[in-house]
Each structure stands twice: as C-alpha cells, then as structure tokens.
Image (cartoon, coloured by chain):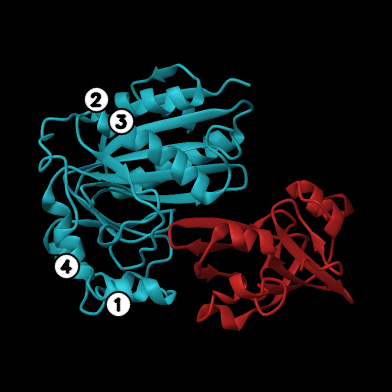
Chain colours: A cyan, B red
C-alpha cells in the first residue's frame, strides 16, 4: 500500500503547544485508516528547555529559567534535556512496521537518521550518523546516541523517540547556533555530571565529562556556514529524502492542522 | 527460555494467572527490543485497568514506550524493586522483572496467546 507523506514548516509556538502538537501527530498516524507519515519542522517561542519524559524536574533551576524568559516543558519522548534556542526542531510520525522504516527502536532511528543525514549533506556539510552510542547524561547534547547526527565528530542533531501501540513519534533538535549551551545556566548543581536516571556503568562514566562535552563537542548550522538556512528549506529537503525512502511523493502543506484534528 | 505457564499478548506483555490474580510483565522479546531500561513508571495500587489500556511507560536511553494491561482488573501490587533497579526487566523479564500484580476480572481469551502462538506472532521457529 502506498504511504502518504505530508509535511509543513509551522513556525514557532510555545513548548506546551509544540509538545501537544507532536502528540497529536502520533495519534493522527495511529488512527489513520491508510499509512501516512507526517513531518513538520518548527521553532519555539519563547526559548524552551525540554526534558525527557522521565527526567526529574528538580534537576532544573526554575527561577533561573524564569529570570531568562525560558519556558520549561516535558517531552512525550525519552532522552535528555535540550534548550531549544536558535535551533530547528523536526518531528516525524508514522505507523510501526513500514518496510522502509521498520518497527524496532534501532531500525526507526537508523531509517530516519539516514534521511536526516542525507538532507544535511545536501546542504554541503559532512553529516554522518553515529554508530551505536549510549548517552545518558542530563543534557541530550552531551552525548551522541546511536544513529544521531554529527559533523566531524561534533553532535549537530539530537533525537528522541516514543513508540505507541501502532505508531512512532521521533523528534529532534538541529542546532542553528551556540545558545543551547546556556542549558548549563539552568541545571541545578549536581544535575550535570551525574546521571539523572540509574544508568549502566558506561553511561555513568560518560557523565563525568558532561559539562565539557556539551560545550565543546557540539556544532551548529551557523558554525558550519549555514546561518541563512530557513526552516522552509530544511523541511523541504528532509521531506524529499523521506519521500525517496518511502517511495512517496511528498506533499507540502501550510500546516498539519487538517491532519491533526481539533 | 520463554515460559509455557504464562499467556502472552501481541503487544509483548505476559500474564501468569493463578487463583483470580495475575502477575504481569513484558516478554524477553520486548525487553531485548527496548534495550537498556533506565526508568519504569507504574500505576498506583488500586487503579482499575481495562484490558488493552496503557498502564505505564518504560523509558530506555533514547525512547519511551507504553505497556498495556493484558486483562481487566485492579492493581494489587507493583514491583517495588524496579524504582531503583529497572534493569531487572532486561535481566529477568519473566522473574524478578515482573511489573505488577492485578485482580483478573475479565479475560478476553482471544487476546491471550500461548507460548507457541506468541512465537508465531514473532515469526520465530518454535
């Protein structure tokens, strides 16, 4: 059965509105009678710290966030904290078990990671998917997970996943500038450099250098000479790569409103 | 080794029913597919669950997934060890890694699979 692919660049919303919208994408693909993949690229206004689904709020200095006008929200997906400030976020939802994307967590990461890396390489940068990794610090960008995207060994894209019964939602942050490092100002003493969840030993060891990793082992579109890249161009390139993988003609929309329901 | 004395769901939960109570967990296949589990959210004791309803979430390093009630009933107990050692589910999904105990009030027999039927769902050789 052919897979329908609909995409949109949607501009900026608050953290709560963005996360509700991403959840609505997952619901929409799960209830669709035919296979549909939805893609959107969006921003955050105000800048927002997003926490992984189970991350403890007590790792965050809420007063410091308020003083800087930074919102705090919880994602429906796993992974570490991300400060969404001068970056593009993408979200992709689709049914589980498509032959082109798969069902297992590593399969989904690999399939979508290949599309992301190819789209970014189309912009002239050497974006590569990392091999198997095992991050586990407070901040998403302090470690490179399996199938996440790095350029010259520096992390550019951090991704997180939720699997429902019939569908998946993956979203991720593509850094556009260095502002994300200001997450360091929002983490309470002890939250960084210490795992926030019980971790297997390799993850815990990696956390020892978390602060250093976040500041120095990331890169962003501006540093890579892509300061002028628009969200519209980014979503179009990503949709083209997804469409090629799915064997579908990607259909542009002004927004996903018609797909997400009330 | 997959156990023959429990029933399975297509969503990769298992339930062992004895004397009107069921012990629920996720299968070895599900645990292996998820990878290293770092957090498990379980329901409160006393919560009523309908068969097929999501009752909790499992988080691995990079993903979140829901778990579903195999039967209808009420939560009697949750595995207290998982708060500190969620990796028990990876290590012993049919034993120490059980998730919860619940009353068994209604069973949809068609939804609960034998070990052989579950292997068929997975496309495994028996």
Q: Are marks 3 and 2 in contact (CB under 8 Å)?
A: no
- Label 4: state its secondary structure: helix
- Label 2: state its secondary structure: helix
Task: Tell me which label, 3 or 4, sits earlier in the chain.
Answer: 3
Seen from the viewer's position, the closer of residues B14 and A15 is B14
Which residue matches tag 4? A212
What distance separates the C-alpha of mark 4 from that of mark 1?
Answer: 13 Å
Which residue matches tag 2? A233
- Label 3: state its secondary structure: helix
Which residue matches tag 1? A194
Seen from the viewer's position, the closer of residues A206 and A24 is A206
| Mark 3 or mark 1, whichever is nearer to me | 3
Which residue matches tag 3? A119
| Mark 3 or mark 2, whichever is nearer to me | 3
**Which label number is shown at residue B32?**
none
Which image quarter: residue A244? top left
């Amino acid at each position: 059965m052919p897979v329908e692919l609909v995409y949109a660049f949607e501009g900026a919303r608050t953290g709560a509105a963005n996360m509700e919208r991403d959840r609505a994408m997952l619901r929409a693909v799960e209830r669709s009678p035919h296979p549909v993949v939805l893609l959107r690229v969006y921003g955050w206004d105000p800048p927002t710290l997003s926490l992984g689904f189970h991350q403890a709020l007590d790792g965050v200095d809420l007063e410091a966030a308020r003083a800087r006008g930074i919102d705090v929200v919880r994602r429906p997906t796993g992974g570490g904290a991300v400060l969404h400030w001068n970056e593009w976020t993408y979200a992709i939802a689709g049914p589980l078990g498509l032959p082109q994307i798969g069902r297992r967590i590593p399969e989904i990461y690999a399939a979508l990671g290949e599309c992301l890396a190819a789209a970014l390489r189309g912009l002239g940068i050497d974006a590569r998917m990392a091999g198997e990794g095992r991050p586990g610090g407070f901040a998403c960008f302090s470690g490179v997970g399996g199938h996440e995207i790095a350029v010259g060994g520096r992390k550019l894209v951090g991704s997180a996943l939720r699997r429902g019964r019939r569908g998946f939602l993956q979203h991720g942050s593509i850094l556009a500038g260095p502002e994300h490092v200001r997450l360091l100002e929002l983490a309470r003493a002890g939250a960084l450099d210490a795992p926030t969840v019980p971790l297997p030993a390799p993850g815990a060891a990696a956390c020892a250098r978390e602060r250093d990793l976040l500041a120095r082992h990331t890169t962003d579109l501006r540093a890579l000479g892509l300061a002028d890249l628009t969200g519209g161009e980014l979503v179009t390139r990503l949709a083209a790569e997804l469409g090629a993988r799915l064997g579908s003609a990607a259909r542009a929309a002004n927004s996903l409103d018609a797909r997400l329901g009330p | 080794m997959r156990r023959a004395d429990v029933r399975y769901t297509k969503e990769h939960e298992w339930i062992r029913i004895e004397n009107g109570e069921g012990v629920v967990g996720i299968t070895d296949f599900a645990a292996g597919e998820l990878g290293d589990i770092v957090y498990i959210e379980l329901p409160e004791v006393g919560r009523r669950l309908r068969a097929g309803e999501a009752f909790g979430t499992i988080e691995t390093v990079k993903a979140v997934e829901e778990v579903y009630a195999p039967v209808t009933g009420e939560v009697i107990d949750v595995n207290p060890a998982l708060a500190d050692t969620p990796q028990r589910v990876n290590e012993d999904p049919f034993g120490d890694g059980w998730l919860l105990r619940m009353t068994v009030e209604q069973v949809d027999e068609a939804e609960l699979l034998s070990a052989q039927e579950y292997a068929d769902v997975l496309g495994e050789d028996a």
